[in-house]
Amino acid sequence: MVKKTFVIEGKLENLEAVIQQLIEQNGGVIVSVKNSKIQWTYIYGRQNLQCETIIRKNSITTEVNNLDGVSYGEGFVVNKFFKLLSEKMAIHKKEILKENKIKNIDSEYKFSDNQKSWSLSPLEKTVLVAVAIILFFVFTFSGDNNNSNLDNDIINNSFSEAENFSNKNKQDIKETIELTRELFNELLLFKDKNDFHHYGFGGAYRYNDWLHRVDELKNSPYAKTILMEYGFALGDLEMLGLEYVESKGKETEYSIWAKNRISSGLNH
């Protein structure tokens, strides 16, 4: 089960009617509408997903359950639905409930006038802290000639530690990019195979291992740094794989966009 709540930043008249339209545009079938609660279903491959969207004054919550007990498909439907909604109004992600675990997170970006805003990456924060420490020691000990040697040692050590930490992060980011490249190339190789079209990422079949590795990859501590420096989100790879499941390996408007975005970033 995947559940996502989005806060509404803009105002839109006839919100319930708009959401019903988007559900149908998303490929869903509305079952019932009552008290701002819309129950609908979505056919995902051979699965019938049970969906529910609740409209409140300042938020929209959509929950998708896979009655077959498989862990993929729900996130694809939820993300596709809110992607369409984001084209209609300004929204941003506030929380995710996935596999019965709640995580409160700040959005990496919010849909508002198509502008993206990010906080500092872990690498940038580390460098700023290191610079602050260095400046502190420079101004504190600069007037004490008797401790000049100690000053130099402290400053040199601070520079050395900051440089070593920065080099380690760069190496880790490089390894993350290489792993992304490997998984991306694997996907392009098996997306056209008949067994992938039939079984997808089912838990009992071999392609499920690829999905697990991508799921671990997207939780990398360098995800924001890669988004800023390479121009794509690590989660894009998972969404591309799920899109190929639905399209049986054929290119769609979304898959072309996602594939080009990832490819351009990897060749950055």
Image (spheres, rainbow, N blue to C red):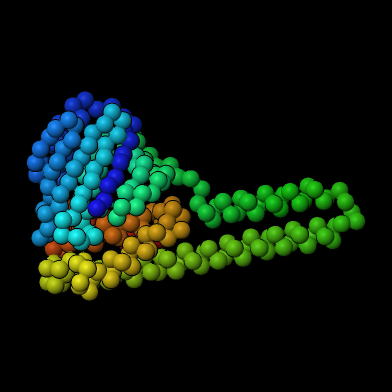
Specify whether residue 267 is in view. no
Q: Residue furthest bottom?
A: 206
**Residue at the location (18% across, 55% down)?**
66
Q: Residue furthest front?
A: 100
Q: What is the quadrant of residue 146 in the picture?
A: bottom right
**Residue at the location (10% across, 60% down)?**
46
The residue nearer to you, when weighing 52 against 109, is 52
- Counting from the top left corner in percent of width and height, residue 85 is at 23, 39
**Residue at the location (55% across, 66% down)?**
168
Q: Residue furthest right?
A: 146
Q: What is the quadrant of residue 233 in the picture?
A: bottom left
Query: Is 202 above or below relative to 116?
Result: below
The residue nearer to you, when weighing 262 against 264, is 262
- Counting from the top left corner in percent of width and height, residue 161 is at 66, 63
Question: Left of 120 or right of it: where is 103?
Answer: left
Q: How many marks?
A: 0
- Counting from the top left corner in percent of width and height, residue 240 is at 25, 59
Image quarter where the C terminus lies is bottom left
- Counting from the top left corner in percent of width and height, residue 27 is at 12, 47
The residue nearer to you, when weighing 265 against 200, is 200
Query: Is 35 above or below relative to 238?
Result: above
